[in-house]
Amino acid sequence: MEFDPGRCSPLTLAPQDLDVSRTKGRVYSPPVRLLFVGKDFFRKGGEFLLRLYSQHLADVCVLTIVSSDPGLDGRQLPQGVERLHHISLERLREIYRESHVFVFPTQQDFMPQVIAEALSFGLPCIANDVGGVRDMVHDGETGFLMSRDAPPERWAERLHQLASTPGELTRMSQQARLFAEDKLSFQRFDDLIRKVVERLRAKT
């Protein structure tokens, strides 16, 4: 069958409420505040993240894990790591605003909603290059894309780079928010749906 590009619609990413996620300028004073959000902590690279933190980042960062994964219940976490679960949506939004970098070493994903959320709050993201992650994380702009087999040392290099350059964190934060405003707004989503409906009506 011959491919008909006219039958395809533009990609729509996970739309976000950009009024709710509006964040005032962050102050990037030490320590750098890392954030992970995800129910399935271990499939999303949790063991890697804990090893990365304890071996390479504990001296310059703190890490907040928001996850209801039962595998974390009762587990002794490294000093400097805080685990939160069963929190309100408003508290989660506060945590996004308080954080500096979103870390997501997932091994398997399609289009992670949490990355869209992080970008809308102006959080640069460092994430494995799997699934549709690269559609939102633009390397060197809205964050860093990492090879799925990249060692912890490579992640640590990137994060130490950001920790030592507040100006770069500020730039990436601004780029993350601008990307969200351009690609992740409800208005863009509504406009896309309206155009698709109009095209379908025109063909009937």
Image (cartoon, rainbow, N blue to C red):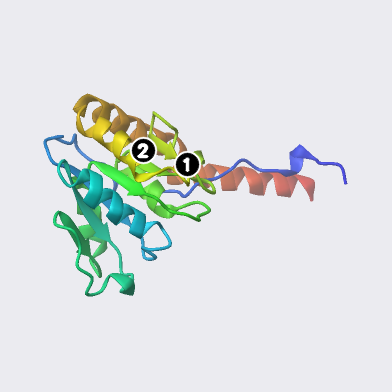
Q: Residues within 10 Å of mark 1 (few under 14, many from 20)?
A: some
Q: Position of residue 135 (x, y in %)?
A: 51, 40
- Name of the residue lying farthest toward the right: 1
Question: Residue drawn at (13%, 41%), measured in percent from left and top?
Answer: 31
Question: Residue drawn at (46%, 38%), measured in percent from left and top?
Answer: 183
Instruction: Answer with the quarter of the image where residue 33 lies.
Output: top left
Residues 125 and 1: in front is 125
Q: Is residue 87 left or right of residue 113?
A: left
Looking at the image, residue 143 lies above or below residue 97: above
* Rendered image: mark on residue 123: none
Looking at the rendered structure, the kind of residue marked 2 is Arg
Q: Is residue 80 left or right of residue 139?
A: left
Q: Are marks 1 and 2 in contact (CB under 8 Å)?
A: yes
Residues 143 and 20: in front is 143
Q: Position of residue 99 (x, y in %)?
A: 21, 46
Residues 82 and 19: in front is 82
Q: Position of residue 98 (x, y in %)?
A: 18, 46
Question: Residue drawn at (27%, 42%), measured in percent from left and top?
Answer: 101
Label 1 sits on residue: 147
Residues 195 and 118: in front is 118
Label 2 sits on residue: 154
Q: Secondary structure at mark 1?
A: loop
Lower sequence index among marks 1 and 2: 1
Q: Secondary structure at mark 2?
A: helix
Q: Is residue 113 visible?
A: yes
